[in-house]
Amino acid sequence: MSEKRRLPHEHDVDSEKLMERMPAEDYFQTVASLMKQMNDPSRLRIFWILCHVEECVTDIAAMADMTSPAVSHHLRILKTNGLIVSRREGKEMYYKAADTDIAQKLHHAVEEIMEISCPIK
C-alpha cells in the first residue's frame, strides 16, 4: 500500500481531495499528444470542415485555401491519429470526421473554444 502524498503546505483540505481525484500522468500525456496534433491552424480547420461534411481532397483544399498536397499531408496526420476516416468512390477518396467518442468530443471542444475566443458579433 502506497503512502498518501502530502502537500508541503496544507492550506486547504480541498487540495487533498483534488489530489485523490487527479488522473494519472499518462492521461495528461494522452491529452497533450492530442492537443499537439491540433496545434496547426490548417489542420484544425480541416478537422473542423470534416466534422461538418464529407469531402474530397480537391474540395477540402478549395475550402481551406490550401494546395492539395498540403491538405493530403494534414489528412494523413489526422487519419493516423484516428480523428478522420476515408472511403473510396471510384478514383475519388472522401474524408470525414471519425464517428468516435474522441473525435466528437474534440469537435465539441473546438466549437466551445471558438465560441469563447472568437464570438460572432
Image: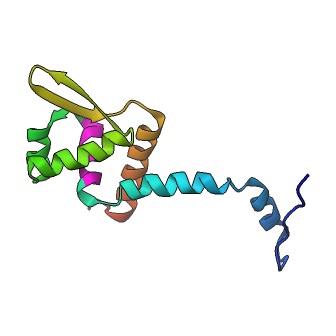
Main structural element of the magenta stretch: helix, strand or loop? Answer: helix
Q: Is residue 96 left or right of residue 88?
A: right
Q: Does the stretch in magenta take in 47?
A: yes
Q: Is residue 115 above or below residue 15?
A: above
* Residue 31 drawn at (x, y percent): 51, 53
**Which residue is found at the position 74% from the left and 54% from the top?**
21
Residue closest to the eye, 17 or 100? 100
In the picture, which quadrant includes the C terminus? bottom left
**Which residue is found at the position 8% from the left and 24% from the top?**
91
* Residue 90 drawn at (x, y percent): 10, 19
Q: How is the image coloured?
A: rainbow
Q: Quadrant of residue 8?
A: bottom right
Q: Is residue 31 left or right of residue 50?
A: right
* Residue 92 drawn at (x, y percent): 11, 27
Q: Is residue 46 above or below residue 55?
A: below
* Residue 44 drawn at (x, y percent): 29, 53
Q: Is residue 45 left or right of residue 16?
A: left
- Residue range in magenta is 43-52
**Which residue is found at the position 10% from the left and 46% from the top?**
68
**Which residue is found at the position 26% from the left and 39% from the top?**
50
Residue closest to the eye, 16 or 28? 28
Q: Is residue 57 above or below residue 115?
A: above
Q: Is residue 16 above or below residue 33?
A: below
Q: Does the stretch in magenta take in 46?
A: yes
Q: How many marks?
A: 0
